[in-house]
């Protein structure tokens, strides 16, 4: 029995190491080839660079309009995530603490809407806001943020809904006895208790919005308002065979969100685990 456990542990570690190598190897190639010339990338893509050349990154920053693109992506992601978390938490609180037939129907429709693919909505969406209302070119960034709030709220409300149900009602009743209004009870008592699931929802939405290409590509038609994925697509079309610029551009695009994920991955696991246990 002990020998079987040892063999099982060894087999598990071997599989884990193989999986780790499979995940890390593409990043290894991305990093080492970011400092090579075009010829060196084609001749020896797997070897370390003969000299670590940082000049490509300066070229990418200039040609990709990186500062403006990064600012647009950061603002859209930050504002959208904050508003999604704020409105979703309040909506879920109302649905849980004010049970009624209409709220149950609304919550059921909300959950059902999560199975509708965006691809089935994008044509009528663009027809309404582009052809009829003609606001896409007038307010592209506010419109994109509004779309993100609409498409991201269903899952966020669903996750908040399950977490809020686990909070004892007696805590809120005690706060009301002490003179707190409904809003005060929510912001001072309930919202701090939602921290684990709030961080989880925020990080998941940041990852989604930062990496999203399809929706921004439909709404943003001006280079001055492009997000990172859209600008990367344009950059890829312009410098299709210039690997010494393409690879650093890809690295610069994914590094910010990769750092965000590495910082918040424990919070994601913690929030999901607490929500499932409760």
Image: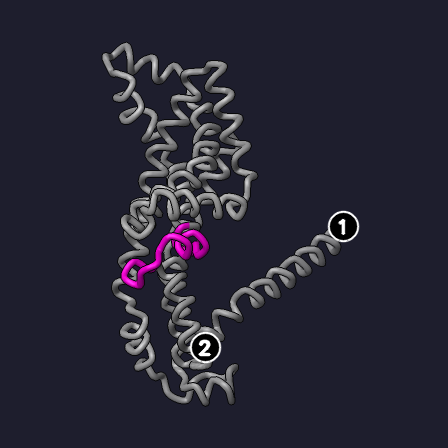
Is 215 one of the magenta-colored residues?
yes
Q: Label 2: which residue?
A: 240
Residue 125 or 197: which is nearer the viewer?
125
Residue 156 or 133: which is nearer the viewer?
133
Magenta highlight: main SS: helix
Is residue 109 found left or right of 261 in the rendered image?
right
Write down the region rendered in magenta: 209-226
Q: Label 1: which residue?
A: 1
- Where residue 117 sits in the image (x, y, percent)? 54, 44
What residue lies at 40% left-to-right and 86% top-to-bottom? Answer: 37
Specify few, some or many for label 2: CA neighbours under 10 Å numbering under 14, 14-19, or 20 or more.
few
What residue lies at 55% left-to-right and 40% top-to-bottom? Answer: 116
What residue lies at 41% left-to-right and 38% top-to-bottom? Answer: 150
Give the secondary structure at mark 2.
loop
- Numbered circle sitting on residue 23: none
Q: Is residue 255 above or below residue 108?
A: below
């Amino acid at each position: 029995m002990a020998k079987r456990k040892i063999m099982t542990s060894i087999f598990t570690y071997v599989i884990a190491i193989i999986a780790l190598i499979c995940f890390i190897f593409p990043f290894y190639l991305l990093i080492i080839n970011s400092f090579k010339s075009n010829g060196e990338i084609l001749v020896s893509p797997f070897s370390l660079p003969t000299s670590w050349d940082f000049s490509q990154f300066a070229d990418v920053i200039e040609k990709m309009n990186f500062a403006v693109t990064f600012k647009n992506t950061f603002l859209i992601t930050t504002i959208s995530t904050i508003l999604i978390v704020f409105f979703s938490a309040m909506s879920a609180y109302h649905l849980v603490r004010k049970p009624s037939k209409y709220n149950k129907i609304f919550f059921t429709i909300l959950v059902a809407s999560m199975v509708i693919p965006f691809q089935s909505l994008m044509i009528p969406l663009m027809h309404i806001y582009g052809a009829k209302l003609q606001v896409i070119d007038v307010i592209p960034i506010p419109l994109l943020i509004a779309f993100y709030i609409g498409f991201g709220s269903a899952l966020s409300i669903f996750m908040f809904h399950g977490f809020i149900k686990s909070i004892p009602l007696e805590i809120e009743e005690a706060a009301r006895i002490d003179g707190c209004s409904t809003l005060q009870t929510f912001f001072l008592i309930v919202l701090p208790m939602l921290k684990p699931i709030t961080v989880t929802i925020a990080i998941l939405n940041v990852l989604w919005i930062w990496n999203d290409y399809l929706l921004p590509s439909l709404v943003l038609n001006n280079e001055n308002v492009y997000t990172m994925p859209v600008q990367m697509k344009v950059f890829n079309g312009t410098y299709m065979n210039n690997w010494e610029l393409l690879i650093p551009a890809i690295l610069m695009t994914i590094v910010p969100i990769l750092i965000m994920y590495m910082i918040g991955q424990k919070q994601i696991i913690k929030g999901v685990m607490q929500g499932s246990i409760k």
